[in-house]
Image: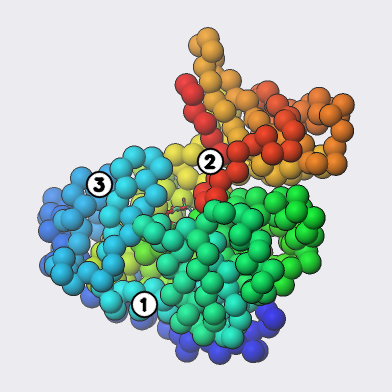
Amino acid sequence: MTDTASAVLDPIETASADEVAALAEERLRWSVRHAYSSAPATRAAFDAAGAHPDDISGLADLAKLPFTTKADLRADNWGRFAVPREKLARIHASSGTTGLATVVGYTLDDIDTWAGLMARSIRAAGGRPGQTIHIAYGYGLFTGGLGAHYGAEKLGCTAVPVSSGLTERQIKLIGDLQPQVIMVTPSYLLAIGDEMERMGIDPASTSLQVGILGAEPWTEAMRAEIEARFGMAAVDIYGLSEVMGPGVAQECGETKDGLHIWADHFWPEIVDPQTGDPLPEGERGELVLTSLTKQAFPVIRYRTGDLTRLLPGTARPGFPRIERITGRADDMMIVRGANAYPSQVEQMVLRVPGLSPHFLCVLTRPERLDVLTVRTEARPDVERARYGELAGQLERLLLAELGLGAQVEVGEPGAIERSVGKAKRVLDLR
Ligand code: DLL
């Protein structure tokens, strides 16, 4: 099912790194000129930085251009559009977890490009024409549902537009329609698995063969948990509304070694999150993306806030690869001098066999010192008498591996609230 031989790739997918870069370079010149000449806020930002499209003859010149930040988009959201309102076929909005939502837009051509990249992504994950795809990403302003939907149709699959929520109905539909592929956040997939077990259904007994999971950070430990429980391959998909939506980068089912960025449409850089200086290949930092083909909402050097590193392509040798995203710079918890991301806590939680993968980090400041409480829950087969022992195990792991002095609470199965979309991992009450 995940063999590449049975999949017909786009010609560009078999191109060399030089060929991909040459195409990207040509498109970059167009994109920069387009954004400058048609998006007033982008032009103003270039002018303020003394930058001009004429300075850009190739990819190596990218660093001459100013970054675009989330704050820039918020400051003048409509000034970043490069086509008149009446040319927009659709709008979406970023989830806005850390402030106001950003409105993004697409021309019909943009939607077609996006559908093509999502089709490419689903195929890279292991999906094939003729299969049925259960889409449990939310439909609406969030890009997950409709992005997946158009890609599934474009690949020649049958899309089941379930959206998120109503978990029992999700399970009934999976049983009735026998999908091979599910597209959903990893945390909601786990909630679906819990509900299946409550209903007496073994999650490994369903028709599902591939899960295309993303929209939130998740770990290798979570992949192992999901693959074992559901008896399916779990692969990572990445994207963000400001840059397009899902389908900016995709992990290949045959290698499961990080995500190939579709660099014929989005050119990646890694920069130091503090200084903004470009970092060489292989060094960890903040991912910065430049759109190369977008008409309605081009973004030049967009600071994603997402932390990863660039590696050479493998299953698609012409395309750069990113390591699984560990988190966002603004998700980092600083507790009495120790820094940690929720994804690192997830790894530790999954190393304690009696704990379920659901958890919440709660930050408080009762006196003048920060306190981190990690709320977890036991797996259904664990006796209550063992909860204290599990808490102790996790506390020791957090201290030994992450240097985090945390209090761990272990609740009963179901104690941690389930989300139907992106999981909330940090509750900051300071
Ligand atoms: O989450 C788009 C998407 C939908 C991606 C469905 C994958 C699947 P936003 O709501 O704008 O868009 O949120 C984007 O989510 O900057 C990352 O911080 C995070 N994120 C997305 N995919 C991953 C992933 C969608 N695979 C923000 N791993 C991004 C880690 C991810 N974080």
Residue, x 78% and y 59% (percent of image)?
A: 201
Residue 113 locus on image (x, y percent): 36, 77
First in sequence: mark 2 or mark 3? Answer: 3
Residue, x 38% and y 68% (percent of image)?
A: 266
Horizontal side, residue 20 vs residue 309: left or right = left
**Relative vertical location of residue 167 with respect to residue 331 in this rendering, above or below:** below
Task: Tell me which amino acid carries mark 2.
Answer: Lys
**Relative vertical location of residue 152 with respect to residue 385 in this rendering, above or below:** below
Which type of secondary structure does the marked residue at label 3 adopt? helix
Task: Tell me which amino acid carries mark 3.
Answer: Arg
Quadrant location of the N terminus in the rendered image = bottom right
Q: Mark 3 highlights which residue?
A: 74
Residue 179 locus on image (x, y percent): 64, 74
Residue 3 locus on image (x, y percent): 68, 83
- Closer mark to the observer between disc 2 and disc 3: 2
Residue, x 56% and y 90% (percent of image)?
A: 8
Horizontal side, residue 313 vs residue 52: left or right = right
Toward the viewer: 184 or 370?
184
Q: Are marks 2 and 3 in contact (CB under 8 Å)?
A: no
Residue, x 57% and y 54% (percent of image)?
A: 166
Which type of secondary structure does the marked residue at label 1 adopt? helix
First in sequence: mark 1 or mark 2? Answer: 1
Task: Tell me which amino acid carries mark 1.
Answer: Thr
Which type of secondary structure does the marked residue at label 2 adopt? loop
Judge the density around disc 1: few (<14), some (14-19), many (≥20) Cα neighbours within 10 Å. some
First in sequence: mark 3 or mark 1? Answer: 3
Q: Mark 1 highlights which residue?
A: 113
Residue 385 locus on image (x, y percent): 87, 26
Q: Is mark 1 within 8 Å of ligand 1?
A: no
Q: Mark 2 highlights which residue?
A: 424
